[in-house]
Amino acid sequence: MRIRRSTAADWEQMWPIVREIVRAGDTYAYEPDMTAEEAYAIWIEEPPGQTVVAVEDDRVFGTAKMGPNRPGAGAHVATASFMVSADARGRGVGTALCQFALDWAREDGYAGMQFNAVADSNQSAIEIYRRLGFEIVGTVPGAFEHPKLGRVALHIMYCGF
């Protein structure tokens, strides 16, 4: 598997992954019925950020977007988001994408990486993030409306460089 910058041609394979995850409603606070065009506008990052894909034999298994967490005085801290196809979970795709984002942020001179809203119910992601050096630095109780569990906490996670 290799990770590379996404191209417009990749969207055809990225959209089903994004659609599946967004419609599930259990990890991202996006509108579940968003269109491909709306998703594209949210997911495809412009410089200084970037969007990447994890591919094997020209098949997209996952995608990540990364860039500054905030503009202006907050632009020295990066952020990233990740989506992995259901049939590729448990194969290290999410870990590889997160490591790629961390390496990118370090190389670009960011002071660290912050995740603003990690649902407490997304324990597999939290495990990956902790393994790669992130800490939970804040928690907002009941801030995420999980479709099956009801209101769960959202964590703010940070990894300093």
Image (spheres, rainbow, N blue to C red):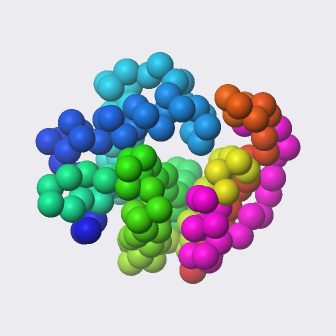
Residue occupying the point 37% across, 40% down: 17
Residue occupying the point 58% across, 32% down: 25
Indicate whether residue 137 is drawn in magenta: yes
| Residue 105 seen in the current view | no
Q: Is residue 43 left or right of residue 1?
A: right
Compared to residue 50, the image places residue 1 above or below, namely below
Residue occupying the point 43% across, 34% down: 20
Q: Is residue 14 left or right of residue 146?
A: left
Quadrant of the rendered image containing residue 69: bottom right
Image coords of residue 159 (percent x, y): 62, 72
Image coords of residue 97 (percent x, y): 40, 64
Image coords of residue 57 (percent x, y): 15, 60
Indicate whether residue 50 is drawn in magenta: no
Image coords of residue 147 (percent x, y): 67, 29
The quadrant of the picture occupied by the C terminus is bottom right
| Residue 38 seen in the current view | yes
Residue occupying the point 51% across, 62% down: 78
The quadrant of the picture occupied by the N terminus is bottom left
Q: What is the number of callouts on the image?
A: 0
Compared to residue 112, the image places residue 52 above or below, namely above
Q: Is residue 4 left or right of residue 64?
A: left
Residues rendered magenta in the picture: 124-144
